[in-house]
Image (cartoon, rainbow, N blue to C red):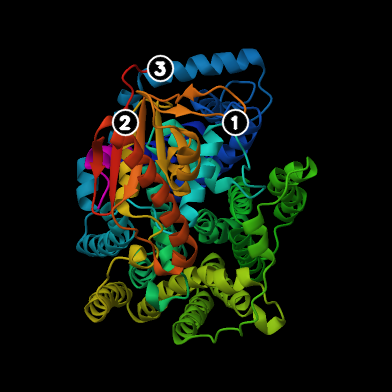
């Protein structure tokens, strides 16, 4: 059962438009990018920098109880003026109040005529004739191939989210609660934990106005799509061609069973995915930072590393390994740029400090670590190191092949050291990823690494498999340029057709194995929250409903409701221990009664007894009320659930 389209579609559109405005449109206007930076790098780098601003600003706003639309807009405005020089133009620092005010007036004037300026810029850059001339048969076929594999990758990650109302996996309820808690000015309700993912989700909810259930349900699948895009984009930047990106996206986006990552995580709700989506961009930006004299690439690389550290320890480890690979590749092929090294030595400790402060400060203030997270972080798994499978061996072989081909091209004055270093960066990243995956060989038996190290390996394997096509194309181009170009495109399209013929892509079947709650349970809460004014309704169900009602309505467990709410009188009365009885402070009460209890097999030993006990209590109260007042109205009925509605005759 999907969510009602009237609830899901507007919320999803709000989420997408809000994300585009926050991470693309506003940064492209507010942030300065040096001349010569490709548009893709600029967009990706600006989004990463904006993400860092949003997370750090979100921490501060939540601490001072100002995490709302006005506070977040203030953070966005600070991005614009943080680097404004005294002359009032972006790109420097040290502006006084007068210069900032003049700059603000100038920005407001610019905003008034932005459609005309945008149209003139578009006409200047892309005339109709030049756009048409760029559509060569090769580019059309390559573009269609890339769109095909991207489209299937997007479908795989969004299909089940569109078909089911329920949020998959047990962490979903926690994610919904923690992100709502941020919007309620509450940090760390369950203990100290990296909050980059939750602050980002909370900010998107607040600024876009998207329904929390929809935003939480789609946020990680959208991050999964970004992970696919990151693999394809870095493959494109390293190879200089769209064709290797087709294969990289084909493997990572549509053939997940070939790779060692838990692809169900990309349709669930998991915070590590935000950090993992930045790993390959860190590889590229770190490598480029050693080649460019300006500081934009190194500042962006460090910003992305900091975001990964603020999001999840495994994401931070993977991003750090990618940064090491990019650095070593640049040093080995182009030498050490000492000003860049000096900059990193000064600012990397500051970034580490910024990453640790959000956890160190609350711990010093007496808060405790989140028990579930800390227990998992400290747990040990004595499982043996996995063997390097044939896919990883193939990825290593073709990555070495690309490095050798580019070495041959460099020797023949047909390549550059920058191209050679880019190939080496991918090879080193794959080698480090496999080394982390083989950690048990070195006596490291962390359960976290055993279960999560495959994420980095999967990214680098897919990247290198795509670059293997670049190796073949560049080798054939040594014989005849046109032969390399067209043969690589034909091979990419042929591999796509062959792969999908042998293994047709199928949706990630997350709900079959991990249904924490039935679809209609979540759909009912979404309908109530959309139709009822905030704070005017009370839901009564087992304690799973707390996370869905929190921040929007009131909630009582079946135990509390049946124990303290009487059935006499025209409206239920709550009997406070040691206090006079008082009517329920809600205009409408919704009672959730299961028609059948649906729980995934893995959760049944813990969840089933609790759900059955709650249902017995709710049914007993409902029977007693209806005996004296008649049948209650049915608000919602699904295959697994009925929701009864009790409306106050005189709304409080």
Q: Nearer the viewer, residue 476 or 511?
A: 511
Tag 2, which secondary structure?
A: strand
Asked if the magenta segment contains residue 121, the reply would be: no
Give the camera-side residue of 460 and 420. Answer: 460
Task: Provide residue 313's location: percent of width, then percent of height.
Answer: 63, 59
Q: Which quadrant of the figure has residue 152?
A: bottom left
* Nearest the eye: 523 or 289: 523
- Percent x, y for residue 622? 34, 40
Q: CA distance from mark 2 to mark 1?
A: 24 Å
Q: Which mark is residue 638?
A: none
Q: Earlier in the sequence, mark 3 or mark 2?
A: 2
Cβ–Cβ under 8 Å for marks 1 and 3 = no
Query: In the depicted view, which residue is nearer to us: 223 or 483?
Result: 223
| Position of residue 580 in the picture relative to residue 543 (left or right) | right
Q: CA distance from mark 3 to mark 2?
A: 14 Å
In front: mark 1 or mark 3?
Answer: 1
Query: How far across and down, in percent of the image, does residue 547 sit?
Result: 47, 43
398 above or below 270?
below
Badge 3 crowding class, 10 Å Cα cut-off, few under 14, some 14 to 19, many 20 or more, is few
Would residue 345 appear left or right of 596 to someone viewing this image?
Answer: right
Q: Which mark is residue 646?
A: 2
Q: Residue at x 37, y 36 (%)?
A: 210
* Residue 51 visible in rendering: yes
Q: Going from the N terminus, do you reach mark 1 or mark 3 first? A: 1
The residue positioned farthest toward the right in the image shown: 364
Residue 134 position within the rendered picture, expressed as x and y whole percent measured from the top left: 25, 53
Mark sitting earlier along the chain (2/1)? 1
In the image, which residues are magenta? 1-11
Q: Do the numbered discs 2 and 1 sit on residues whose CB atoms are within 8 Å?
A: no
Residue of label 3: 652
Asked which secondary structure carries label 3, the reply is loop
Q: Which mark is residue 577?
A: 1
């Amino acid at each position: 059962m999907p969510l009602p389209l009237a609830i899901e579609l507007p919320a999803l559109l709000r989420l997408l438009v809000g994300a585009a405005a926050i991470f693309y449109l506003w940064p492209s206007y507010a942030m300065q990018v040096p001349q010569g930076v490709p548009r893709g790098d600029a967009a990706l780098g600006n989004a990463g920098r904006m993400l860092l601003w949003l997370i750090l600003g979100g921490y501060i706003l939540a601490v001072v109880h100002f995490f709302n639309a006005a506070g977040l807009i203030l953070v966005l405005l600070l991005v614009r003026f943080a680097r404004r020089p005294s002359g009032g133009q972006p790109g420097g620092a040290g502006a006084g109040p007068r210069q900032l005010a003049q700059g603000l007036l100038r920005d407001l004037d610019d905003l008034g005529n932005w459609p005309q300026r945008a149209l003139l810029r578009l006409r200047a850059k892309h005339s109709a004739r030049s756009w048409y001339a760029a559509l060569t048969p090769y580019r059309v076929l390559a573009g269609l191939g890339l769109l095909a594999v991207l489209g299937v990758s997007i479908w795989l990650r969004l299909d089940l989210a569109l078909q089911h109302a329920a949020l998959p996996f047990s962490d979903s309820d926690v994610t919904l609660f923690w992100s709502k808690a941020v919007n309620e000015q509450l940090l760390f309700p369950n203990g100290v934990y990296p909050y980059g993912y939750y602050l980002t989700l909370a900010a998107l909810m607040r600024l876009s106005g998207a329904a929390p259930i929809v935003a939480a349900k789609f946020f990680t699948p959208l991050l999964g799509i970004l992970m696919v895009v990151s693999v394809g984009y870095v493959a494109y930047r390293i190879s200089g061609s769209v064709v290797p990106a087709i294969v990289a996206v084909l493997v990572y986006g549509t053939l997940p069973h070939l790779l060692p990552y838990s692809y169900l995580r990309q349709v669930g709700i998991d915070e590590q995915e935000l950090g993992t989506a930045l790993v390959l961009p860190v590889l590229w930006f770190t490598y480029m930072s050693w080649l460019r004299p300006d500081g934009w690439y190194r500042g962006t690389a460090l910003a992305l590393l900091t975001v990964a550290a603020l999001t999840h320890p495994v994401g931070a480890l993977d991003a750090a390994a990618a940064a090491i690979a990019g650095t070593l590749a640049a040093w080995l092929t182009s030498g050490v740029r000492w000003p860049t090294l000096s900059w990193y030595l000064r600012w990397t400790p500051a970034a580490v400090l910024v990453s640790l402060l959000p956890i160190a400060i609350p711990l010093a203030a007496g808060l405790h670590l989140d028990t579930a997270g800390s227990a998992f972080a400290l747990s040990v798994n004595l499982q043996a190191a996995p063997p390097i499978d044939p896919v990883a061996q193939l990825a290593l072989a073709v990555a070495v092949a690309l490095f050798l081909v580019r070495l041959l091209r460099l020797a023949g004055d047909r390549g550059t050291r920058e191209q050679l270093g880019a190939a080496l960066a991918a090879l080193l990243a794959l080698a480090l990823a496999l080394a982390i995956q083989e950690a048990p060989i070195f006596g490291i038996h962390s359960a976290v690494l055993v279960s999560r190290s495959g994420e980095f390996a999967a990214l680098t394997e897919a990247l290198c498999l795509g670059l293997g096509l670049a190796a073949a194309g560049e080798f054939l181009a040594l014989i005849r340029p046109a032969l390399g170009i067209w043969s690589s495109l034909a091979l990419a399209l042929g591999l796509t057709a062959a792969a999908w013929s042998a293994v047709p892509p199928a949706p990630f079947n997350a709900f079959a194995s991990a249904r924490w709650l039935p679809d209609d349970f979540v759909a009912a809460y979404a309908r109530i929250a959309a139709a009822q004014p905030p704070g005017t309704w009370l839901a009564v169900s087992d304690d799973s409903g707390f996370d869905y009602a929190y921040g929007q309505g009131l909630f009582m467990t079946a135990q509390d409701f049946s124990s303290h709410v009487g059935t006499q009188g025209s409206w239920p009365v709550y009997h406070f221990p040691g206090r006079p009885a008082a009517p329920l402070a809600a205009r409408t009460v919704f009672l959730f009664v299961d028609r059948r209890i649906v729980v995934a097999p893995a959760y049944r030993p813990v969840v089933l007894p609790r759900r059955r006990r709650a249902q017995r209590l709710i049914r007993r109260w409902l029977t007693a009320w209806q005996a004296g007042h008649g049948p209650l109205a049915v608000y919602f009925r699904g295959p697994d659930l009925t929701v009864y509605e009790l409306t106050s005759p005189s709304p409080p």
